[in-house]
Image (tube, rainbow, N blue to C red):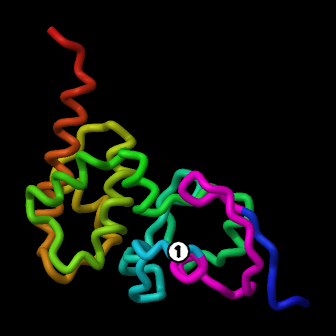
Amino acid sequence: MDDVFDITLTVNGRRVSRRVPVRQHLTDFLREELGLTSCHVGCEHGVCGACTVRVDGAATRGCLTLAVQADGAVVETLEGLSESGEIVDLQAAFVDRNALQCGYCTPGMLITAAEMLDAKQPMSRADIRTFLSGNYCRCTGYQAIVDAVETTLTARLAEQEPSA
């Protein structure tokens, strides 16, 4: 059995081919091979959410996913979501509401919140907290994060409403 495997995937809209160690985690691949540092390594057990990326449209723990498992997949990091403009309003709300402090959890929080916002469904503050509950933050106490997500959700839902 070989120690390496050839993979090809699309990362932030760019096709990438590399030879990777079979045990390399997706997070390490993104950081070390591609220089995409928004994906953080936190607990390495899939609990903290710092390693969250989007794989084929779904928020995924990069520390629990091997790079070889992403062969053929579409992977999006915070860099990609930022460049596309998809979450510009959410990022602005995080700044306006002071929902980031050290910033370590922020990429995972933003990717998880983006997934929630994509559903375009009204949610209570409790629902938002539950949706984000797999992402740990040691700095903010979550209040400001929930405020930012709620603000963005309210604005997006208002944009959907037909004009009177």
On-image quarter of the N terminus: bottom right
Near-viewer residue (7 or 53): 7
> In the rendered view, does 34 fall on the left or right side of 94?
right
The residue at the point 24 percent across, 38 percent down is: 122
Residue 126 sits above or below residue 28 on the image: above
The residue at the point 23 percent across, 32 percent down is: 157
The range drawn in magenta is 9-33
Q: Position of residue 7 (x, y in %)?
A: 76, 69
Image quadrant in which you'd find residue 164: top left
Asked if the stretch drawn in magenta spans residue 11, the answer is: yes
User: Regarding mark 1 in the picture, which secondary structure is present there?
Assistant: loop
Q: Position of residue 113 (x, y in %)?
A: 32, 55
Q: How many marks?
A: 1
Near-viewer residue (122 or 139): 139
Amino acid type at mark 1? Gly
Image quadrant in which you'd find residue 91: bottom left
The residue at the point 15 percent across, 69 percent down is: 142
Residue 22 sits above or below residue 26 on the image: below
> In the rendered view, does 112 fall on the left or right side of 136?
right
Q: Residue furthest right?
A: 1
Near-viewer residue (132 or 15): 15
For label 1, the residue is 62
